[in-house]
Image: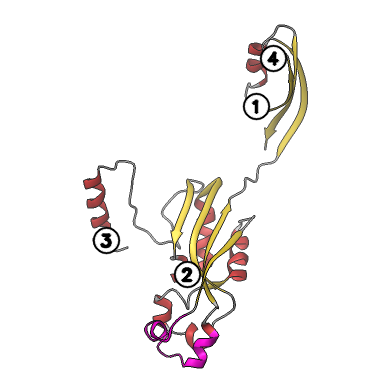
Amino acid sequence: MTDEMLAEARNNQARSGLTNVEFIKGHIEEIPLEDNSVDVIISNCVINLSGDKDEVLKEAYRVIKPGGRFAVSDIVLMKPLPEKVQKSLIAWTGCISGALTVEEYREKLAAAGFTSIEVQLTRVYNFSETDAANIMPELAKEELEKVNGNVGSAFIRLIKRSHHKFYCKKVTAYGEMTFLLTYIFYGLPVLIISANSLGKPNCSISMAVCSKS
């Protein structure tokens, strides 16, 4: 993002009257936000353009809150591209030569700390000779055949899991429901397992009282 692009975005924001939006200039390899401060990261065909994708994904993990989501669309490969394409700056700016294979994407996300990684392929590309002439002009026709069907779009999504451990014990209490709520919830999260005659005098209720470390 250039300063001119940010200025235009802020002008559009002012004209729209939006007050809950902020534009912050930075690099995705060094996000200018605090640890565990972001609920959701979204991106559309950007990560493949970075020269240091490991750092991009580490930064994403750093700023996402536990329970936060990572949901991006990006170009992926079914297998590595021919060396000629990998070295092409035109193909890089066309979001092709900088793309990761699906397996590489999974490995780098896992190395950054993410789990339960889902990569959903949404489209596979077959380039016409005209398209290839614009994006990969150095490719011969037989080389293009090796690229076709090997480049796709994918939706990558996951949730940053909490590393807290929960310790629970079953508690059975007696009395009116108003007393139970005051007593049981004091400083502890509670999962109700079973309850009988709630709201009545002399009822009983069984709960799992949990604390985290």
Element at label 4: loop
- Picture layout, residue 185 above or below residue 86: above
Q: Amino acid at mark 2?
A: Asn
Q: Which mark is residue 5?
A: 3
**Quadrant of the image for the N terminus?**
bottom left
Q: Amino acid at mark 3?
A: Met
Distance of label 4 from label 3 (alpha carbons): 59 Å
The crowding category of the residue bearing disc 2, from other C-alpha atoms within 10 Å (few below 14, some 14 to 19, many at least 20), is many
Distance of label 1 from label 3 (alpha carbons): 48 Å
Q: At which x and y percent is residue 91?
A: 42, 80
- Residue 179 colored in magenta in the image: no
Residue holding disc 2? 48
Element at label 1: loop
Q: What residue sits 62% from the left and 24% below the top?
A: 187
Q: Which mark is residue 188?
A: 1
Locate residue 13 relative to residue 212 in the image: left or right. Answer: left
Locate residue 127 relative to residue 211 in the image: left or right. Answer: left
Element at label 3: helix
N-terminal-most mark, 4 or 2:
2
Residue holding disc 4? 198
Q: What residue sits 57% from the left and 80% below the top?
A: 80
Distance of label 1 from label 4 (alpha carbons): 20 Å
Residue bounds of the magenta highlight: 127-146
Most common secondary structure along the magenta stretch: helix
Extreme residue in the top direction: 201
